[in-house]
């Protein structure tokens, strides 16, 4: 049977109300009494009921994590952000409520209005995100991983995609490349409002124009066999291009096998650079020079800022918009 507060009280030699006060923090308990209660809790394996704790402290110790796994996108890319959010929340004493409903606005309204969470982290943020008005109206604070069009009243964390693109173009230009292909996320990501796609692509095109480079932009694909067909068609159409920039997780994951099948050697025949995390690169054995996409850093920053705002809004200060600076890791895929 489950251990109760009364069991803990008997074991510690105190009243059940004293145990309740110790758990909720609503009254000061002497150090010696708290020590006995803590020892009893540990020995008996007592876990406070979440509902009772919420009534006692007005906190659930739960963070809502809202995202969507679109069928037309590469799921492993999104999962990179879920784990650091979950790990950091657990480190800070919070559980995660993962919400993936299609009607994300209604889901957000439900979990906040019902007091199911103390705060919310939004992933998969788009340019004009319909969830933001609901989040701003909620009593609970929110943090975003991804840059929307309007950031007012919210803590926002994202990679500096524009600077990432400029860093890659600078690297290739410095090596003497003058004709470059850039492969972006699929067209439907742009149409859906995935601003990270055009932030990267537009910055790459602007940098190329500054240097007088030929740059050929293409939308990539997110599923096989379309990925292989697309890359082959692009490279066949641009035989004089000497470098390839890939900003597309599904495409870069498949690229080693696609290039091997067509007999293209990297970097002898084609220099390749990309943008992905170290963990993603290890998972797919990717040998390419790349900008670190920093999902761990972004998830950790978002949760830490959110927990600080939950605990002490005044100390947390005004809402922030922070960009992680890109870092280039050389892996010998350019010449």
Image (tube, rainbow, N blue to C red):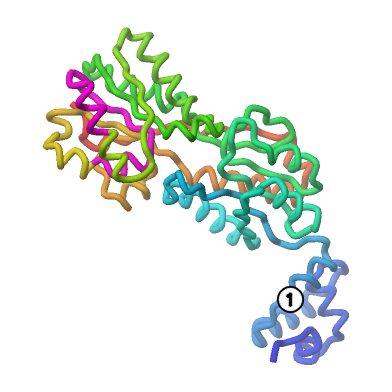
Is 224 situated above or below 246?
below
Q: Look at mark 1 in the image and give the residue it sits on.
A: 48
Is 210 situated above or below 163?
above
Choose top left, top right, bottom left or bottom right for residue 124: top right
Is 41 situated above or below 130?
below
Residue 24 x %, y %: 81, 69
The residue drawn where x is 32% and y is 19% is: 216
What range is drawn magenta here? 231-255
The residue drawn where x is 59% and y is 61% is: 90
Residue 217 vs residue 294, the one in the foreground = 217
Left or right, residue 335 beside residue 191: left
Residue 297 vs residue 119, the one in the foreground = 119
Magenta stretch encompasses residue 240:
yes
Q: Are there few (<14), some (14-19), or many (20+) residues within 10 Å of tag 1?
A: some
Magenta stretch encompasses residue 13:
no
Residue 221 x %, y %: 37, 37
- Determine whether the residue tagged by mark 1 lies in a helix, strand or loop: loop
Residue 246 x %, y %: 33, 32
Locate the N terminus and report the quarter of the image it occupies. Answer: bottom right
Residue 166 x %, y %: 40, 21
């Amino acid at each position: 049977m489950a251990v109760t507060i009364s069991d803990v009280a008997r074991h510690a030699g105190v009243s059940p109300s004293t145990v309740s006060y110790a758990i909720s923090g609503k009254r000061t308990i002497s150090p010696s009494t708290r020590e006995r209660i803590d020892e009893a809790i540990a020995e008996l394996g007592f876990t406070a009921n979440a509902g009772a704790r919420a009534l006692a402290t007005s906190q659930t110790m739960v963070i809502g994590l809202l995202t969507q796994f679109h069928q037309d996108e590469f799921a492993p890319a999104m999962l990179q952000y879920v784990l650091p959010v979950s790990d950091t929340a657990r480190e800070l004493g919070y559980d995660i409520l993962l919400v993936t409903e299609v009607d994300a606005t209604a889901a957000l309204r439900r979990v906040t209005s019902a007091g199911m969470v103390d705060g919310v982290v939004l992933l998969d943020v788009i340019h004009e995100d319909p969830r933001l008005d609901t989040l701003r109206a909620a009593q609970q604070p929110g943090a975003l991983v991804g840059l929307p069009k309007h950031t007012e009243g919210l803590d926002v964390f994202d990679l500096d995609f524009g600077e990432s693109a400029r860093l890659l173009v600078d690297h290739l230009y410095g090596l003497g490349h003058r004709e470059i292909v850039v492969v972006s996320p699929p067209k439907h990501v742009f149409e859906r409002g995935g601003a990270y796609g055009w932030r990267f692509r537009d910055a790459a095109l602007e940098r190329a124009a500054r240097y007088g480079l030929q740059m050929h932009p293409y939308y990539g694909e997110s599923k096989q066999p379309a990925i292989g067909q697309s890359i082959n068609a692009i490279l066949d159409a641009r035989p004089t291009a000497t470098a390839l920039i890939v900003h597309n997780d599904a495409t870069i994951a498949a690229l080693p096998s696609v290039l091997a099948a067509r007999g293209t050697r990297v970097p002898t025949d084609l220099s390749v650079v990309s943008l992905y995390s170290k963990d993603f690169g290890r998972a797919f054995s990717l040998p390419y020079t790349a900008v670190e996409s920093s999902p761990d850093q972004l998830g950790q920053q978002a949760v830490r800022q959110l927990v600080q705002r939950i605990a002490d809004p005044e100390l947390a200060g005004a809402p922030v918009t922070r960009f992680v600076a890109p870092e280039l890791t050389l892996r010998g895929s350019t010449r």
